[in-house]
Amino acid sequence: MRLPRFNKVSFLIFLSVVGPGIITSVVDDDAGGITTYSVAGANFGYSLLWTLIPITIALIIVQEMCMRMGMVTGKGLSDLIRKSFGARVTFFVMIALLLANIGTTVAEFAGVAASTEIFGISRYITVPMAAIVVWVIVVKWSYKKVEKLFLIMALFYITYVISGLYSGPDWGVVAKEFVTPSFKFDPAYIYLLIGIVGTTIAPWMQFYLQASVVEKKAELKNYKYAKWDVIIGSIITDGIAFFIIVACASTLYVANIQINDAADAAIALQPLAGAFAAHLFAFGLFASSIFAAAILPLSTAYYVCEGFGWEKGVDKKFKEAPQFYWLFTITIILGAAIVLIPGVSLITILISSQVLNGILLPFILIFMLILINDRDIMGKYTNGKVFNIVAWGTVIILIGLTLFLLYMTIAPMIMLA
């Protein structure tokens, strides 16, 4: 894949196109993602680092297809599914996605609560404030302002890079583990391997990316720049995952400290890597949770409105797209309110949403591949033979991993029933 030549004009064009790819990929390092990477590093050291290479390639392939469909058709993924597969299929897909996204949104507000409580601030203060701030920004601002803010927020993920550097890893060992595939026939290892794949390539991402490309009105003549927006975003998100795993592997794994979530990791890092690294880790969890708490409800509103043919878009006023803004509002209210219920099992909600995402992911990928190879829809911009082989191979592997994840998730529940 050849880099475009960047002169002053090219760079300005790239800046006008950049956004959807980077925002969609980076926000995937949300509370659930950070927890998965933290547990992977704490429980298995550097041994899962190698998975980030094939996962990054798969993420680039999937995201590029969505970006290309959005630029060629000017339509979102839900819209294309409805027109090609019918209203009934679309209805069931939208309901399942809606339930999964509400569960994931709860996890994001749980991340806000956990990170601020590390600093001694009650969730009953921070969660409602976060919900209000997110709502005001998205509802009252234009798309360009919202996108610029999201790109600025993406910079806060540098905290994980700094935490990883401060953790004092043996970079020779890190480099060796990163490029040397290894495998353990350990259920916990396999579960985390699948979890890393699942947290990196989620169904909501494809809908949000394509909707963002359409709303940004990206032109096909700038395709090569949009493609690099996707590639850079995918590399950044998995680069962040790399440093999270390194930070936890270099400290918690070495000290044999087990954790359950990202908040545990931030607290446990303090005596091992110092207060600075621990506070940076906690702040990164807060920033990523706020970021995702805005994007997840927004992606929900986008794909449901597309699926049912309703007006949508951040550039629309509330009265112009009432369904869009009400869906966004209700998702935020539910996500924040559930976190504030005393004694609620957030882990159950998180697992349920992951199971739904696991069920949906293969179907969404198959829909995408059928659509992108339809010449009536894509014209000359369908996948080439080599790209199809790689893309279908990715789908088959993801389906296999997803089915195995479902088995590992559901089997213990059946045995306990």
Image (cartoon, rainbow, N blue to C red):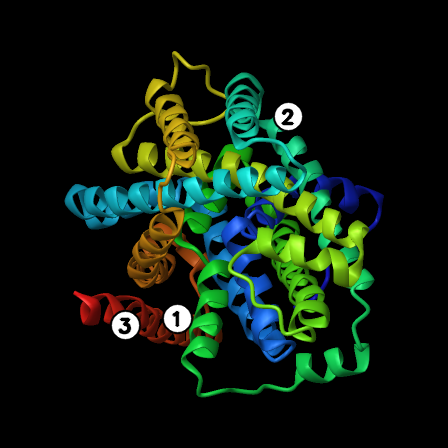
Callout in the foreground (2, 3): 3
Decide if residue 146 is in sight here. Answer: yes
- First in sequence: mark 3 or mark 1? 1
Q: Quadrant of residue 328?
A: top left
| Residue 73 shown left or right of residue 268 in the figure | left
Of marks 3 and 1, the one in the foreground: 3
Left or right: 46 with respect to 84? right
Residue that numbered label 2 is attached to: 145
Q: CA distance from mark 1 to mark 2?
A: 36 Å
Of helix, strand and loop, which one carries label 2?
A: helix
Pointer 2 and pointer 3: residues touching (CB < 8 Å)? no
Q: Please tell me which residue lies in front, 33 or 250.
A: 250
Picture coordinates of residue 261, whole percent (x, y)? 53, 56
Secondary structure type for disc 1: helix
Q: Residue at x 36, y 46 (%)?
A: 345
In this picture, is 360 found above or below 152? below
Q: Local crowd at mark 3 within 10 Å, few (<14), some, or many (≥20)?
A: few
Quarter residue 74 falls in: top left
In the rendered structure, which amino acid carries the disc numbered 3? Tyr
Residue 111: percent from left, percent from top: 53, 43
Residue that label 3 marks: 407
| Marks 2/3: CA–CA distance | 43 Å
Give percent across and percent down for residue 114. 56, 43
* Image: 329 above or below 300: above
Task: Please state if 187 lies on the left or on the right of 84 as rendered.
Answer: right
Of marks 1 and 2, which one's residue comes earlier in the chain?
2
Residue 26 position, x and y percent, is 60, 50
Query: Which residue in the structure is indicated by mark 1?
Result: 398
Residue 374 location, quadrant: bottom left
Q: Nearer the viewer, residue 189 or 238?
A: 189
The disc at residue 319 is none
Give the residue displayed 23% in from the left and 45% down from the top: 90
